[in-house]
Amino acid sequence: METKDSAANAYAMAIEQIESAVKYMEIETCFVDRLKTTDREVTVHLPVKMDDGTYRIFTGYRVQHCGVYGPYKGGIRYHPDTDLDEVRALAMWMTWKSAVVNIPFGGAKGGVNCNPKEMSSREIENLTRRFTWGLSNIIGPERDIPAPDVYTNPQVMAWIMDTYSILRGYAVPGVVTGKPLELGGSLGRHEATGKGVVITALQACHQLGLDPKGLTVAVQGAGNVGGVAAAAFSKAGFKVVAISDSKGGIHNPKGLDVNAVLACKNQYSCVIKPGMKGDSVTNSELLELKCDILAPCALEGVITKKNAAKVKARIIAEGANGPTTPNADKILHDKGAFVVPDILANAGGVTVSYFEWVQNLQNLLWDEEEIGRRLEKRLCSSFEEVHGIAMEKKVDMRTAALILGIGRVARALKLRGFYP
Ligand SMILES: NC(=O)C1=CN([C@@H]2O[C@H](COP(=O)(O)OP(=O)(O)OC[C@H]3O[C@@H](n4cnc5c(N)ncnc54)[C@H](OP(=O)(O)O)[C@@H]3O)[C@@H](O)[C@H]2O)C=CC1
Ligand SMILES: O=C(O)CCC(=O)C(=O)O
């Protein structure tokens, strides 16, 4: 398995991003200091009974970055590389993301350092229930609402909802989003992040005067975000030329049969099998392929100062959180690449999570068309706002999105009375 670039510490990246954005803002230092700090960081040690009868102790984290105008919100990841710094960064990015799309959530993120690929479903359930118990006093529909992230899914959300509901004594669907539909999940949540990547990439094409029909796309990651994005790119008329997972990818410059690749992934847990029309490609090679759009949809820190100059794509649509390091950002900007930053490109997920939460609180059920319409409207108007700031301040799209997000949060802090 290829691993992420070890030089990139996500938390250091998140801090550096704040520092470069605030240079363009009129914002008092005390706000900057406040926003570089998290509200709460909880570490829990989780004794979990394994199938062989032994116990293993896992470490889990929930970081709440800033909850100035609503409950904290953000996914939970199960991954062997997860640590506190990563979760801190992911929580900060959630704060800016919710602010960019203007939904009343603060930022949080959770993670457990574990390898779910080596665990049975029962072991993952035991871990999840223990983790939920550990967080039960800090989560809740009005406090902090988890959702799926890397290597977690609707079933994990169902176990969180069940454990939390048992502790409270009644069903509390609003404690998590990304739940199964049967438990109050929202139509369209599963597809929301991947579709949002395509909606925002289309906006970028529009800004650059590019006709999307036939533009080539390489997608890193074939999970919830990458898989849905690849299918949606293909449906929108783009030519998907590469898709990968953690083991590597498949590449065909003439275009892939995306449905066949995703069916292969579904059936055999890999994106390439003998007989498929395409060549194998490593994850590093995928990033440097000749294509119009690159959609990194797996882990953070994959586009670095080492490979940024070799990225050929004109548009980088960041499905993943934090795929591009600040040094790489500068290189991409200088060579004229148009980066749709994570806090805008992948904000479709939290946007439909917000719709799910709203439906749960009001016992409503919106249809898929309604969800899709609201999602597109929200992402397109956010894109426009971010692009407007980029033009006005002559900055790249990430800096513009951060200016918008940080500005909104800082104004809310001030209104609540956080003065120097
Ligand atoms: N789910 C959501 O709604 C949202 C997710 N995100 C972000 O999107 C990214 C992906 O999340 P999501 O799709 O949900 O996660 P999933 O667990 O559904 O999928 C992760 C995918 O990434 C692949 N992958 C893992 N490690 C590597 C690697 N080193 N190189 C290349 N591919 C790798 C996995 O491969 P394999 O299957 O082989 O393990 C899998 O295909 C993360 O950065 C997440 O934070 C952002 C917003 C919302
Ligand atoms: O749906 C959500 O609440 C959050 C999704 C998430 O973790 C993210 O946007 O990174």
Image (spheres, helix red, strand yellow):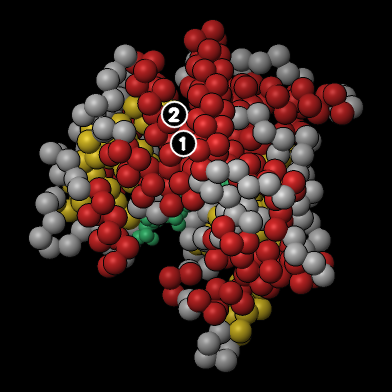
48 to the left or right of 277: right
- Residue 177 in sight here: yes
Question: Foreground: 354 or 72?
Answer: 354
Q: Position of residue 194 (x, y in %)?
A: 43, 42
Q: Mark 1 near mark 2, Cβ–Cβ under 8 Å?
A: yes
Question: Foreground: 191 or 123?
Answer: 191
Q: Position of residue 55 (x, y in %)?
A: 61, 85
Q: Looking at the image, which residue is at 10% across and 60% down? A: 275
Q: Position of residue 172 (x, y in %)?
A: 75, 60
Label drawn at residue 196: 1
Q: Position of residue 358 (x, y in %)?
A: 70, 43
- Taking the view exactly as shown, the residue that stands out farthest to the bottom is 53
Question: Foreground: 142 or 28?
Answer: 142
Label drawn at residue 200: 2
- Identify residue type, mark 2: Thr
Q: Looking at the image, which residue is at 19% across and 45% down? A: 256
Question: To which quarter of the image does residue 204 belong?
Answer: top left
Q: Residues within 10 Å of mark 2 (few under 14, many from 20)?
A: many
Q: CA distance from mark 1 to mark 2?
A: 6 Å
Determine the secondary structure under disc 2: helix
- Identify residue type, mark 1: Gly
- Residue 75 in sight here: no
* Image quarter (top left, top right, bottom left or bottom right) of the N terminus: bottom left
* Above or below, 222 relative to 21: below
Label drawn at residue 387: none
